[in-house]
Image (cartoon, rainbow, N blue to C red):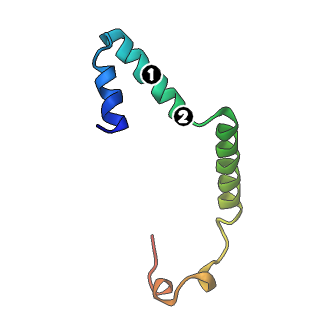
Amino acid sequence: MGAFESILELARTLTDEDRVRLARLLLQKQEPADGEHNEIAAGERGLHSWTESARGDDWTEFCPVALRQKRVG
C-alpha cells in the first residue's frame, strides 16, 4: 500500500468533523504564503501598468508575418 492509500485509510477512521478540519488544514497549506501574495499582486500591477502604457503602440514589427495579415476588431 502506498503512502497516499495509508493516509486515506487513516482519514477514514476520523469523525466527519475531524475530516472537515483536516481538509481545511490541507487546503490552507496549498495557498501561497503572504510574501507570495504580495509578489503576485506586484506582478499583476506591473503587467497592468505596462499594458496601459503600451496600449497605443504599434507592435506589428514584432509580430510574425502571418499574424500581420490578420486584423483583430
63 over 40 or under it: above or below = below
Asked whether the residues under the numbered discs 1 and 2 touch, taking CB atoms below 8 Å apart as contact, a structural biologist would say no
Q: Is residue 59 left or right of residue 20?
A: right
**Type of amino acid at the residue the image marks with label 2:** Glu
Q: Residue at x 67, y 33 (%)?
A: 34
Disc with the residue nearer the chain's start (1 vs 2)? 1
10 over 56 or under it: above or below = above
**Type of amino acid at the residue the image marks with label 1:** Arg
Q: Position of residue 60 (x, y in %)?
A: 59, 82
Q: Residue at x 65, y 53 (%)?
A: 48
Q: Residue at x 67, y 73 (%)?
A: 57
Between residues 45 and 39, which one lies in front from this camera angle? Answer: 39
Q: Residues within 10 Å of mark 1 (few under 14, many from 20)?
A: few
CA gap, disc 1 and disc 2: 11 Å
> Which of the 4 quarters of the picture holds residue 59?
bottom right
Q: Residues within 10 Å of mark 2 (few under 14, many from 20)?
A: few
Which mark is on residue 24? 1
Label 1: which secondary element: helix
Label 2: which secondary element: loop
* Count of marks placed on residues: 2
Between residues 20 and 52, which one lies in front from this camera angle? Answer: 20
Residue denoted by label 2: 31
62 over 17 or under it: above or below = below
Q: Residue at x 44, y 82 (%)?
A: 70
